[in-house]
Amino acid sequence: MIYSSELIKGTLKTIVLKQLENNKRMYGYEITQKVKELTSDKIQITEGALYPTLHALEADGLVTTETEYIGKRVRKYYSLSPKGKSTIDEKISELADFMNTMKFLLDIQPQTI
Amino acid sequence: MIYSSELIKGTLKTIVLKQLENNKRMYGYEITQKVKELTSDKIQITEGALYPTLHALEADGLVTTETEYIGKRVRKYYSLSPKGKSTIDEKISELADFMNTMKFLLDIQPQTI
DNA sequence: AAAAATACATAAGAATATTATGCATACAAC
DNA sequence: GTTGTATGCATAATATTCTTATGTATTTTT
């Protein structure tokens, strides 16, 4: 099962920033693969969504970049800036709060495995 | 605190359908007020977002409408159609699943009040 | 040798929100 | 008594952010 696209909207930046927090230094393709793996293929970030998002994060000063060559192929590494580090914590606690509100609003019961 | 708008994106239809499931028959303005009240003002649905969404739900056959006059003022009531009833259950379980995935992905700990 | 995977990027289009505007009635305050 | 706030609908211009498609090129697998 892949989540309907509308659900992912609004959470992509948070997902990307969190991966960079966990892994210090990642390139775009690596982020898509890591998220795919961690979510058992449930969240598949497309390139058309990822790259504009990474560029926006860079323009906002939340990430910094370094370009490297692996053989003849270019690879662009992204890292959290100090501003990005403080932003990710805020974003995650806002999302956590939002999810609690949604659970209440939609009568979603906690998982009783 | 009001949630940043991007978070709400993609959940508006689900919120509206759930309110109609809970209350059988509601008009647009009533939905915005009920959601505002239930979420302690954290989720404020704007009219520019609500009405196009209601019209889309009607076009998709998920809700039916009845127009009534209260004095001289018009009021448009919305109710879940059979199709809407099955859709809301699917949407909520998908969202519940998605939220669990996000919790895992973002290392969000359960509330220990 | 061909196909699939890796790796970047942009552009056209769709979906869905924000913000602004418009109309109109009802009620409260000054 | 009229002015502001609340109720109640709706649409339009704009912005954001995604999907889908396209483009280029290298590396690895079949």
Image (spheres, coloured by chain):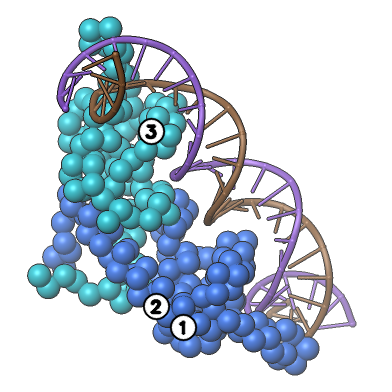
Chain colours: A cyan, B blue, C brown, D purple
Q: Residue at x 48, y 67 (%)?
A: B13
User: Residue B103 in the image: x percent, y percent?
Assistant: 21, 54
Mark pair 1, 3: CA separation: 38 Å
Which quarter of the rendering shows the N terminus of chain A?
Answer: bottom left
The reply to whether residue A89 is visible in this rendering is yes
User: Residue B107 in the image: x percent, y percent?
Assistant: 17, 49
* Discs 3, 2: same chain: no
**Residue type, mark 1 in image:** Pro
Badge 3: how crowded within 10 Å, few (<14), some, or many (20+)? few
* Furthest residue in direction left, as rendered: A113
Tell me whether circle 1 and circle 2 mark residues in contact (CB < 8 Å): yes
Query: What's the mark number on residue A47?
Result: 3
- Disc 1 is placed on an element classified as helix
Closer to the camera in the image, B80 or B82: B82
Q: Residue at x 65, y 82 (%)?
A: B76
Residue occupied by mark 1: B82
User: Residue C20 in the image: x percent, y percent?
Assistant: 72, 52
Mark pair 3, 2: CA separation: 33 Å
- Disc 2 is placed on an element classified as helix
